[in-house]
Image (cartoon, rainbow, N blue to C red):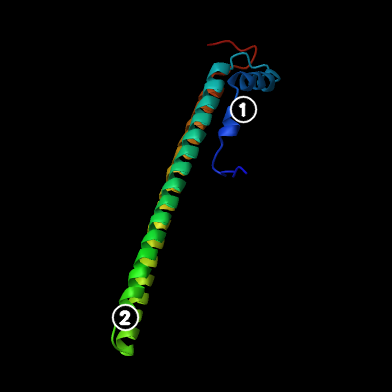
Amino acid sequence: MKTQNPFDLSDVFKKFDPAAIGEQYKGIFGKFNLPNLDMTALIEAQNKNVQALTAANRAMLEGTKALMQRQGEMVKQVLEEASEAVKSVGSVSTPQDAAEKEIKLIEDSVSKALTNFSEISEMARNTQEETTKLVTTRFNESLAELRANIAKLKPEGKKDA
């Protein structure tokens, strides 16, 4: 059974057809009779949008992979430390020493867990920031391109001065 990766948009991008998008734009903007509309620029902008989404998707996948890999390393380390802890508690001579050693182990374990949690949170935050920056940057560029394209339009019947 194939597991679906919620971050994998490759199937969506396989269906991306710049020519079909161009035809859709022609159909939409053709209704408005805008003869000066630069269809090539609009199609290029859409290509840039897809590239930005692909980069954001790749960054998210790489971040998720690194996060999962680090969590696996942390689990392995915790298991190794737990095994050593059990051995060390068994080697004490008095119940008081055993209790003190167990308290120290609990204290160290909680401290390590909090450190690990902070590290994982930081990794997730960095990935989120990177993908958000990629998408936001492209969105802002896209708006600027759209404004520039609209500024080039001349209402029908008007001539250059």
* Position in image of residue 29 (x %, y %): 66, 21
**Residue visible at 45% across and 40% down in the picture:** 59
**Image coordinates for residue 85, horizontal then vertical, percent:** 34, 73
Q: Amino acid at mark 2?
A: Lys
First of labels 1, 2 by sequence position:
1
The label number, if any, that marks residue 4 in the structure image = none
Q: Using the rendered view, name the quadrant where residue 82 is placed.
A: bottom left
Label 1, label 2: how many angstroms apart (C-alpha)?
Answer: 61 Å
Which quadrant of the figure contains the N terminus? top right
Name the spot of residue 39 as percent of width and height, x first. 58, 17
State the residue at coordinates (62%, 22%): 21
Q: Which residue has dot 2 on it?
A: 101
- The amino acid beneath tag 1 is Lys
In-image side of 128 versus 94 (left or right): right
From the viewer's side, name the closer residue of 138 and 98. Answer: 98
- Secondary structure at badge 2 equals helix
Query: Can you identify the residue that label 1 sits on?
Result: 15
Taking the spot 36% from the left edge, 64% from the top edge, the residue there is 80
